[in-house]
Image: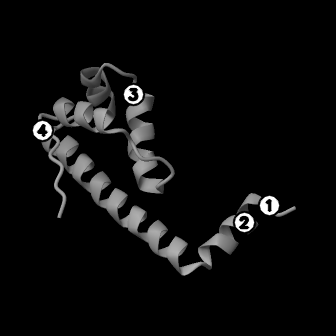
Amino acid sequence: MRTHDQLIARLMQRPGVRKEVERIERDEGALLDLLLKARQEAGLTQAQVAERMGTLPPAVARLERALATGKHSPSLATLRKYARAVGKKLVLDLT
């Protein structure tokens, strides 16, 4: 039986899988940059954003960390709450 790391390494050898993983990392990294910039411009800490979102500070830390690691994609509802908390509006664009 293969370990999880061995399975991931094998899957990453497949061009389609590697390309999709790289796309997700690039897109989520850009989203994280936007969120952090908006929070900084608003002059808010993670705890203050959490309070405005009606959640706890660890939830905001997990959200930001998840985008940094690419391990989890937040829901649109969560992104909307975050955007409102930092005085922004979430706008989606398909190009």
Label 3: which secondary element? helix
- Note whether 4 is above or below 72 in the view shown: below
Q: Residues within 10 Å of mark 2 (few under 14, many from 20)?
A: few
Q: Residue at x 36, y 57 (%)?
A: 28
Q: Nearer the viewer, residue 88 or 42?
A: 88
Residues at marks 4 and 3, CA–CA distance in whole angstroms: 19 Å
> What numbered label is drawn on residue 57?
3
Q: Earlier in the sequence, mark 3 or mark 2?
A: 2
Q: CA distance from mark 3 to mark 2?
A: 34 Å
At horizontal 31% and vertical 52% (from top left) the residue drawn is 32
Q: Tag 1: residue type?
A: Thr
Horizontal side of 78 relative to 40 (left or right) equals: right
Q: Mark 2 = which residue?
A: 7
Element type at marker 4? loop
Q: CA distance from mark 3 to mark 1?
A: 34 Å
Circles 2 and 4 in contact, beta carbons < 8 Å: no
Q: Position of residue 54 (x, y in %)?
A: 31, 19
Q: Earlier in the sequence, mark 4 or mark 1?
A: 1
* Three-letter code for the amino acid on which mark 2 is drawn: Leu
Q: Which of the two discs, 4 and 3, labels the residue nearer the N terminus?
A: 3
Q: Residues within 10 Å of mark 4 (few under 14, many from 20)?
A: some
Are dots 2 and 1 in contact, CB under 8 Å?
yes
Query: Residue 3 — which label?
Result: 1
Q: Amino acid at mark 3?
A: Pro
Q: Position of residue 63 (x, y in %)?
A: 40, 40
Residue 14 location (% of width, % of height)? 59, 78
